[in-house]
Image (tube, grey):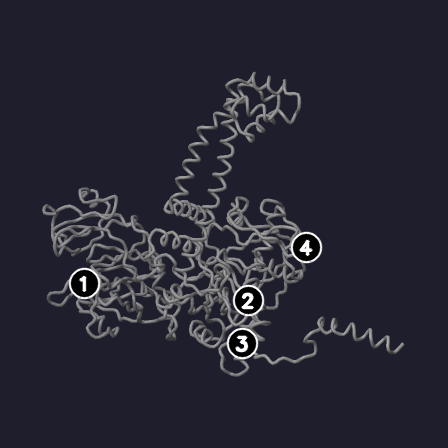
Amino acid sequence: MARKKAEIKKKTKPKMDAYIEGAGLVAEERITQTLEKNYMPYAMSVIVSRAFPEIDGFKPSHRKLLYTMYKMGLLTGKLTKCANIVGATMRLNPHGDGAIYETLVRLSRGNEALLHPYVQSKGNFGKAYSRDMAYAASRYTEAKLEPICEELFREIDKETVDFVPNYDNTMQEPTLFPATFPTILVNANVGIGVSMASAVCPFNLTEVCETAIALMKNSDANALDTLKGPDFPGGGYLLYDEEELDKIYRTGRGSVKLRAKYNFDKAEKCLEITEIPATTTVEAIIEKIIALIKAGKIREISYLRDETDIDGLKIGIDVKKGVDPDKLMQKLYKLTPLQDSYSCNFNILVHGYPKVMGVYEILKEWTAFRMSCVRRRIQFDLKKKKEKLHLLKGLGKILLDIDKAIKIIRETEEEAEVVPNLMIGFGIDEIQADYVAEIKLRHLNREYILKRTAETDKLEEEIAELEDILGSDRKIKNVIISELRAVMKKYGQERKTKFFYKSDIEEVEESEEVEDYPCKLFISESGYFKKCTMQSLRMASDQKLKEGDRMLSEAESSNKAELLFFSDKANVYKAKAAQFKNTKASDLGDYIPAVLSFDSGEGFAAMIETLDYSGYLLFVYENGKCAKVPLSAYETKTNRKKLTGAYSDKAKLVAVFKLSDNSEIMLRTTNGRAMIFDTALLMPKTTRNTQGVQVMTLKGKNAAVARAFEVTAETAADLKKYRSKTIPVAGCLAKDLEDPDQMSF
């Protein structure tokens, strides 16, 4: 018996050894090889299938959720419980319901995390600006797709993008969305992969579309001309740093500085924070301020509270008596997250690989992707139209003898022979014959067939047009441009994030209560300033001037007015009328370059007074260009004395005008030409140092704009010869025109 067992064991041993060969052995292997074999596939899966957005602007989790809602009919249907949406999404997304619902919450309008939300919401979806405000469970909230999602799904059923099976191979899902606008830059997207991360900040939809159009028309276009900077859904202020923005646009890396928006309630002595940086939360700000108060670093605050309610975010800060709120805010900006930086890292999946790209390259990739979508859509439409045309041509042959067709069908003994007999009888193919054979008996009349065949010519024209577009990249780009303009018109909105400048970061100065009374302000060409009361002017109105000097401008204003003194070096020096003493007409006045400490070699150019920074400034340059800039661009929270980059230094400044409404301006050149234009022809520019637009075309060697004047409607009517309804123009020769110094404008 033992011998028999040993024989059996001997026979089976080689087979067992072959089956478990190498089992129990310890093989040496380098740690790098182990990581490459075991960890790299996981790392790539996280990056490609979870953490990073693709060129359509979505991560896989976003795409699966939105596509599920689209298939549920929630683009045009009614709101449904979020639990239903989460459950349906699990057919595409193998992760748990908690992760899916969290994705839905972030995409919703109620959460306020996106500049253009994709999900319309009802119920408590929490807030992106609050850490502790929890969203309600999915069984309580309701949602549907926002109208803007129509731009994501409009062509998805026309084979514009590839579809792949879902995780259990029971249905198909799109690999990308054929979005008609660059969603990748419009809504923020942050993701953390393995060894790399992505942080795409949001930009204004209108500005993004304009930039995409500009780059399609001219690949060398400057994005800074149309894309002013990131635009965050929470608003606030963004430091306008052109050099840093240009770096981000070209490399995809860099950082932008954000700060909160506030206002001061004088009656309640309360600072109200209403907009905060996108990188922080209400709770983080309050906790930091409390810590600073306890540490004795801030003593100006008497009470702090969170006043956020159904109307939106608000942090109330009661300040102690005698505290300057602007100086306190400068301190809070420096010490708390009320001023923070957003680090940009535009890491995007392109053709399955992560790539850090600037705005220029992103829009180039998006344009190529969009052109592919449009080309595939046209090919789909072309195929359908050709198929229909083919059927109609077969129907046209039947029109020649309907009775013959009826006779063939009636006399055919077997049903299977109907199609072959029609093919033989009319010389048509099987597809056409089958179409004819399926026509209802009631439709076998001349009127029906004539109506169908009348479409033939129209279809042939449409097919020719589609083939023409398909053969030209330029025409495909024109289709994309028209779609972008339609999106801008339908969904464009004003910027939520405004700008502040480097000069605003500095500390404010103490301000005293200013007495308010009417006065008249004078400034001479060389820079002598006078503030005269109305009473002193009634006693003597002749203004004393230095020899060779003349009065440049005068304005009736108030002692509370703010004054902007522009230098010839593109700087502006800010002052208050109250800081100058009242002078008499017989005095020379204050020499502004000395009083305001102009830089060495810097001279005076113009003065503007304002009470509320409303209206516009018009800058006229020697090269015939004019720039219209909102006066509010020079308003700062801090009382700074000097702002650099006040206007463009590309050409010599001729004159500056303050416009409360549209005005008529006359320009005169060194070679004797003149023209008058309405300032309504100029669109306002958001940046102070814009070069403006060409208003007057200069003819002749060394020609330049020498003088500029604001003219009355009556004067402009008398000089209609010089008026122009369009710009730019060369103007007319002004030999018969009076010396401008002698004219009444």
Answer yes or no: is residue 141 visible.
no
Q: Which amino acid type is shown beneath numbered disc 4?
A: Gly
Is disc 2 in contact with disc 1, using a CB cutoff of under 8 Å?
A: no
Mark 1 vs mark 3, CA separation in Å: 60 Å
Which residue carries the number 2 mark? 44
Viewer-side label of 2, 3: 2
Quarter of the image for residue 502 reads bottom left
Residue 215 lies, in percent from the top left, at 36, 54
Which residue carries the number 4 mark? 87
Which residue carries the number 3 mark? 288
Is disc 2 in contact with disc 3, using a CB cutoff of under 8 Å?
A: no
Is disc 4 in contact with disc 3, using a CB cutoff of under 8 Å?
A: no
Q: Residues within 10 Å of mark 3 (few under 14, many from 20)?
A: some
Counting residues from the start of the chain, the first of labels 4 and 3 encountered is 4
> For the residue labelled by badge 2, is the local secondary structure a helix, a strand or a loop?
helix
Q: Nearer the viewer, residue 149 or 694?
A: 149
> For the residue labelled by badge 1, is the local secondary structure a helix, a strand or a loop?
loop
Q: Which amino acid type is shown beneath numbered disc 2?
A: Met
Quarter of the image for residue 245 reads bottom left
Residue 427 lies, in percent from the top left, at 51, 24
> For the residue labelled by badge 4, is the local secondary structure a helix, a strand or a loop?
helix
Residue 726 lies, in percent from the top left, at 25, 45
Mark 4 vs mark 1, CA separation in Å: 86 Å
Mark 4 vs mark 3, CA separation in Å: 40 Å
Which residue carries the number 1 mark? 540
Q: Residue reaching furthest bottom? A: 295
Q: Which amino acid type is shown beneath numbered disc 3?
A: Lys
Q: Residues within 10 Å of mark 4 (few under 14, many from 20)?
A: some
Q: Residues within 10 Å of mark 1 (few under 14, many from 20)?
A: few
Viewer-side label of 1, 3: 3
